[in-house]
Image (cartoon, helix red, strand yellow):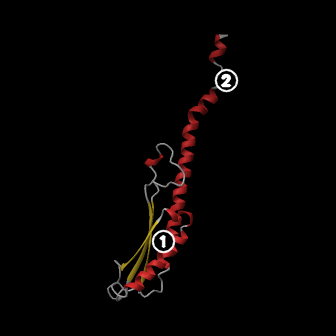
Amino acid sequence: MTKRRRHDQRGAAAVEFALVAPILFFLIYAAVSYGIALSVKHVMTEAAAEGARAAIGAQIIPGTDADQNAAYVRVAAARAGGSLGVYKTWAQVTPTVGTCPNAAPNQGSTVCVTVTVTYPYSTHPIIPNAPGLGLIMPSTLASSFSVELQ
């Protein structure tokens, strides 16, 4: 009878599953969490692009007609904020107007409108972090988009 007990495999699969299941569930949760963070980043990139595109056709010249420049910047911020959807509550939209850093010297005055969207993911996560998952998740998501105006 003792020889039969040593070769008995009943319950071995349950013990193996109990050892592997927490690791498997943690990896699945990490993949879903990271996928959602990438989805938020994509929405932010699209919102920044939409906001920057709102300035196309504007005659923005740095240092002149500050009211008109501010109006275009407000339009860009509003367009970007409207594209954020549910993330609009915590996301911050920052449009800026300035000279383009890589403008060709023979092109006259070129102006860049840059819209930057930041989201504090550590303080407002879409789904709660699993224990230890905060080490790989970014604390802040940021995306920017620039449009060169001539």
**Amino acid, disc 2:** Arg
Q: Is residue 95 left or right of residue 130?
A: left
**Where 56 falls versus 19 (above or below)?**
below
First of labels 2, 1 by sequence position = 2
**Where 76 falls versus 87 (above or below)?**
below
**Where 31 falls versus 52 (above or below)?**
above
Q: Nearer the viewer, residue 148 or 89?
A: 89
How packed mark 2 is, by other alpha carbons closer than 10 Å (few <14, some 14-19, many 20 or more), is few
Point out the frontmost of discs 2 and 1: 1
Q: Residue at x 50, y 72 (%)?
A: 80
Q: Quadrant of the N terminus?
A: top right
- Mark 2 highlights which residue? 10
**Secondary structure beneath disc 2?**
loop
Number of numbered markers = 2
* Relative image position of residue 14 (x, y in whole percent): 63, 29
Q: Quadrant of the C terminus?
A: bottom left
Q: Residue at x 67, y 23 (%)?
A: 10
Q: Nearer the viewer, residue 80 or 53?
A: 80
Spatial CA distance of label 2 from label 1 is 59 Å
Q: Nearer the viewer, residue 42 or 125?
A: 125
Q: Residue at x 57, y 42 (%)?
A: 25
Question: Where, by quadrant of the figure, is residue 140 drawn?
Answer: bottom left
Q: Is residue 4 left or right of residue 70?
A: right
**Amino acid, disc 1:** Ala
* Relative image position of residue 69 (x, y in whole percent): 41, 83
How packed mark 1 is, by other alpha carbons closer than 10 Å (few <14, some 14-19, many 20 or more), is many
**Secondary structure beneath disc 1?**
helix
Q: What mark, if any, has residue 18 been given in the picture?
A: none
Question: Where, by quadrant of the figure, is residue 86 drawn?
Answer: bottom right
- Mark 1 highlights which residue? 48
* Relative image position of residue 122 (x, y in whole percent): 45, 53
